[in-house]
Amino acid sequence: MADQILEVGTETVPAPIFGEHIDRAGARADACDMKLLEFESVSLAVDEFGDKSAPPVLLIAGATQSMDWWTPDFCERLAAEGLYVIRYDQRDTGASTASPPGRPAYEGIDLANDPIRILDALGVDAAHLVGLSMGGGIAQYLGVTAPQRVRTLTLIESSPMGGDPGELPPPDSSLTAAENELPVVNNWNDASTVIDYRVEAERPYRGSFGFDEDRIRAIATIEFGRAKSIESSLLNHFLVAGETHADPSAVTMPTLVIHSDSDPLFPLPHGLALARMIPRATLLRVNGMGHEAPPPKMWDVVIPAIVDHVGRYRENDTSESPAPPKDENATRGVPTWLTETRTSYDVDASGYAEEVQGLLDVHPHLRAHLDVFAELVQRDGGGRVADVGCGPGYVTRYLHDAGVEAFGIDLSPAMITLAQRVYPDLHFEVGTMTSLDLAAHSVAGIVAFWSTIHIPDHTMAGVMKEFHRVLLPGGHVLVGFHVGDSIKHATNGYAGQPISVDTHLRQISTMSDWLREANFQVESESVFRPDDNVPGAIVLARRHR
């Protein structure tokens, strides 16, 4: 393979980021097919990766960024998973049409509709949109205004474009300080000066992973070499960025929200708000990433998440109205995730029961927490305790034997039938924790023993409010769950049958925050097997009186 080179004007500059030849367009000549799409008032540069008959994924960069920040190796990784990947230069970036600095010859609505122009030109009826920052805002806008052209959304380090997200935290104060310290650029045609400026402008947006200066410098070098006006690239988007609005709650298609806990521009609550507002959203909370396109060390997390999200909805929402429900439960307003979870446990009830048989016998730490919970309930006067998501009923039995008036609730009728057969002296009923068939203030305790793991993040706040509603003042809740920052999708049950269910891994702080927001006082937090790939955790909390 040829040496690493990049042509910038007539100069040849080292390009340390990519492992193969990079041509003047900033992409490996053997990997992509750049073209310039001509429209009435604008030319947009577009790159394509992968089989054009595969599910189309359109990458939308953030403000001031050319397509180069979606690096070719990132695009290739997606394409290798069976996707048709499209990246493009937004107006004023890369090889697309440039306006004079400070005088953009377009409005925000034009930026927002450019993806539709591209899809039209490429003959794509509908695509999966992946947007970063402002690109995520554009994706939200199109999800609301052109739902027939959007199959799914993936929103990375973005923020609600409208609606009522509540009060969101401002950018980190370090960003303003860093902007004031940026070097002055007197000559925007001087490669060395401008590239240094670009690197320093990106540095404050780093996350806790740190700043990969070599990588950022290489991208900035490519970007400078391709830009018609780098000064316009770095200025004009900010002059039109606030002109378009869309309420995320009006987004109807499945949405994956990817947000880092160390984004300095849009702190984590921005991502949480998106996941809460969009009805069919799933949150992937990641650690260490800044306000940036996912860096290589995050690709093993982010790329599989995007591929899985796209793969599950390859043909979704391509009509002018939302796709018709696939089952009668959906027509009654039951979310798809809930139907899939119920069906999966109905199919795999016996396999799951066999898997957890004897679990408490070999895990004294789990027994100890259940014992503490039972003691607290009895100390405060006793009363009924709901084992929510009881499965085959083994925790219900343990609590009953510990002196607690426990009964079980589960989403799966097959699980309830099994529990009733094994423990005929106990009470079990079919129900869901999202809408408990219990009167207000009617139970002294709730146990959710690894049962909230299938609840999407945007639904968890409602679950906690439901727990609060049915608990007596001072009542206790125990929540057990897997620790992590990802979503795992299972297609095979414990007994080998085909299923479809998501498992959400969460940090203790996330679960405790949900409890506190629902007016619970967190009493204790415990982690089990912290060195395992997937540790376990239990949070004990108490309803305020």
Image (tube, rainbow, N blue to C red):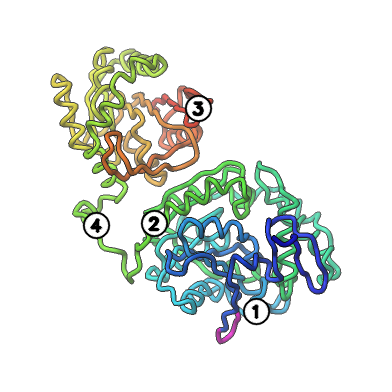
Which mark identifies residue 532? 3
Looking at the rendered structure, the secondary structure element under dot 2 is loop
Question: Are discs 3 and 2 less than 8 Å apart at CB?
Answer: no
- The mark that comes first in sequence, 3 or 1, is 1
The crowding category of the residue bearing disc 1, from other C-alpha atoms within 10 Å (few below 14, some 14 to 19, many at least 20), is many
* Residue that carries the numbered disc 2 in the rendered image: 254
Q: Secondary structure at mark 3?
A: loop
Residue 347 or residue 114, whichever sits in front: 347
Q: Provide the residue designation for mark 4.
A: 326
Q: Is residue 73 magenta?
A: no
The amino acid sitting under disc 4 is Lys
Quadrant (top left/top right/bottom left/bottom right) for the C terminus: top left
Residue 52: x and y, percent? 46, 69
Label located before the other in sequence (1 or 2): 1
Chief SS of the magenta region: loop
| Quadrant in which residue 92 is drawn | bottom right
**Distance in Å between CA atoms under marks 2 and 4:** 15 Å
